[in-house]
């Protein structure tokens, strides 16, 4: 999910949002554990998420926004931009320590 102008090729995260920006290691597939990424004037938060219709392991979500933002700002912007997706979460979004 993207807030603002997102064109493949312009956003530095491109296809990494699908399973490559979420926490790994012991936190792989732990819903709600997020990583925050800052790159080339963009910010992304990414987490494992089975709150939608697909309940398989490996389902994930990411929210990308132009500019550099804190984790709390990103969560608030996600909730405001996509209230239907935020409301269906059955877990809190928390900033995780990065895992290898």
Image (cartoon, rainbow, N blue to C red):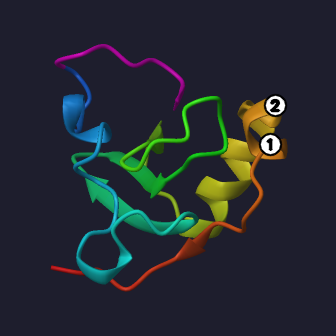
Q: Residue at x 31, y 46 (%)?
A: 41
Q: Is residue 51 visible?
A: yes
Q: Considering only vertical position in the picture, is 79 above or below 4?
A: below
How many other residues sit within 10 Å of disc 2, few (<14), some (14-19) or many (≥20)? few
Q: Is residue 84 left or right of residue 94?
A: right
Q: Is residue 84 left or right of residue 6?
A: right
The label number, if any, that marks residue 88 in the structure image: 1
Q: Are marks 2 and 1 in contact (CB under 8 Å)?
A: yes
Q: Is residue 12 visible?
A: no
Q: Considering only vertical position in the picture, is 44 above or below 91?
A: above
Q: Residue at x 23, y 78 (%)?
A: 25
User: Residue 70, how many percent across, how many down?
Assistant: 53, 67
How many other residues sit within 10 Å of disc 1, few (<14), some (14-19) or many (≥20)? few
Q: Determine the CA span between mark 2 and mark 1.
A: 6 Å
User: Residue 89, how many percent across, how many down?
Assistant: 74, 51
Q: Residue furthest top?
A: 7
User: Residue 39, how many percent across, how many down?
Assistant: 24, 52
The label number, if any, that marks residue 62 in the structure image: none
Residues in magenta, as a range:
1-9
The label number, if any, that marks residue 84 in the structure image: 2
């Amino acid at each position: 999910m993207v807030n603002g102008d997102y064109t493949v090729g312009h956003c530095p995260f491109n296809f990494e949002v699908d399973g490559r920006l979420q926490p790994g290691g012991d936190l792989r597939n732990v819903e709600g554990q997020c990583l925050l990424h800052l790159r080339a004037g963009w910010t992304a938060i990414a987490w494992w998420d089975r709150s939608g219709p697909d309940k398989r392991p490996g389902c994930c979500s990411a929210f990308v926004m132009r500019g550099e933002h804190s984790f709390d700002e990103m969560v608030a912007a996600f909730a405001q931009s996509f209230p239907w997706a935020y409301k269906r979460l059955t877990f809190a979004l928390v900033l995780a320590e990065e895992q290898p």
